[in-house]
Amino acid sequence: MKAARLCLLMFVLLTVPVLAYCYHSKSVDVATVRADPSKHDRITSVTLSNGREITFDRSPRPVLLSDTLRGMAHGVSASVPMDSVQRVWVSSVDAVRTTLAVVGVAVGVTVVIAAIAASNQSQMHTTSQSCPFVYSWDGQRYVFEAEPYGGAITRGLERDDYGELPSLVADRGEYRLLVANEVNETQYTNQLQLMVVDHAPGITIKADEFGRFYAFDSLVRPSAAHDQDGRDLRPWFAASDELIWEPLAPPDRAHGARQEITLTFARPPAATTGFLVARASTGLWGSQMIRQFSQLRGTALADWYATIDTSRSAAAALHQWNLREELYALKIAVEEPAGWEVRGVIPGGGPLLAADRVVPLDLSHVRGDSVRIRVRPPYGFWALNSFAMAYRTAGEVQVTTLEPASARTSDGRDVLGDLRSADDRYYAMPSTGDYGFVTFKAPLVALGATRTVFVHARGYYRMHLDPTAPPDSTTLTRFFSTPDAAALFAAERYAAQRSPATFAH
């Protein structure tokens, strides 16, 4: 039997040209790279704490020696002390998985898929607690582009998510997605759709957390951005790039629980509404803390899940606590004559990809020719990439919704019925390494138009935790009774697990 499987694998690999592959680019925690560089794929670049970026050549691969990253950058030898590194960017390629996608799931090939999926489990990175990974087919490879419904850790928190897919192209009349479970959890996807917008060139299409789409012909970048110590953060927030401001947890309580960031935007005369476009994600440490917070419930976790799943008031109370603490939802305050007033909220998301979200803001009380907004992210819980403001929309947005035409799992099951509507049917991925392929019929692009495509995913996930650990009721009670107790707990855990040399800010 083993020989037969090997022969089948060789047949697939030798008869199907590997013209495409699965491409994965993400940032990883500096301390995890220090602890075991061999666990990570090729390091492509680093972002330094002073905002400088260093991109390494493909060959030779950079290596970590004596806590210094050594490689070649544009043909010149580069030595980067890890103490100066804020983020490490890595990329990976999985040619075998895409070869199987090209082959399709036919009789007998499921044996090969199962074998490859099992081998992939040892290569998955679990430095964050996340959600499904959605890859777009760009005509040659699958590109990692979305992490839907982050933070929805049980069915009572199930939610919709809308993520742009800039790499997605139509291939032989269809769009193709790959949906994968690459972390230690069971993922339940209730619905999967594509939202297609054809629009005039030069128009930017963005979505808010509720699935409303906006067209902008002008976006204003901040004229000033500072933290509470007066440091200039405008270079970090000026563009959607690899400069991502992530206030890491401090080494002790003396630093407090959060930072304060103030941004200034030029304001047209009489503008009473603004549309903040915030590109942000959950911080890498904040993502890991979702698991630690949940594990504190120990043997009582199943009962807590049941309460959240069946009680709307319990789920609402949890939402209000999260909003108070701003761990996975970040309040936006606008400066008005009477002081700072909360006028919007940036929703949380997956930790590996920053995503744009539109937040409409009431500016009717603002005076003068500028708008000042303030965010107060707890240390370690937020990664902020860029901010922009619009003061008008460029007309109505016409959205075409595409339902999946086919959906098949890595073990050959047809799950199309599980994904076509929001109901009691779910496509479940219980194991790290599970994945499936979903296709959509691609309509023709309107004459003279440009197309922007979003994936709409609805679902939740359950982390794989130790069900036998005793609950820590004292700590949990403190979280809910004392403001910032959860953020300070996270800072203490960070200090216990990281060297002080890793604090970039």
Image (cartoon, rainbow, N blue to C red):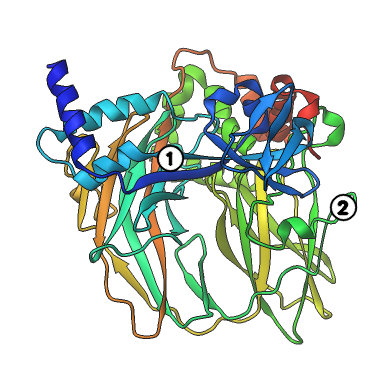
Residue 305 horizontal/vertical position (percent)? 43, 32
Q: For numbered disc 1, what is the local secondary structure?
A: strand
Could you tell me if residue 426 is visible in this image? no
State the image quarter where residue 110 is shown.
top left
Residue indicated by mark 2? 231
Kindly identify the residue that appears in the image at 24 percent across and 55 percent down.
420
133 is higher (above) or lower (below) than 162:
above
Disc nearest the viewer among 1 and 2: 1
Could you tell me if residue 226 is visible in this image? yes
Residue closest to the far left:
107
Q: Name the amino acid type tagged 2.
A: Arg
Alpha carbons under labels 1 and 2: distance apart: 38 Å
Residue 117 horizontal side relative to residue 84, left or right: left
* Residue 69 or residue 206, whichever sits in front: 69
Q: Residues within 10 Å of mark 2 (few under 14, many from 20)?
A: few
Residue indicated by mark 1? 93
Q: Considering only order in the chain, which callout, 2 or 1, is on the residue closer to the N terminus? A: 1
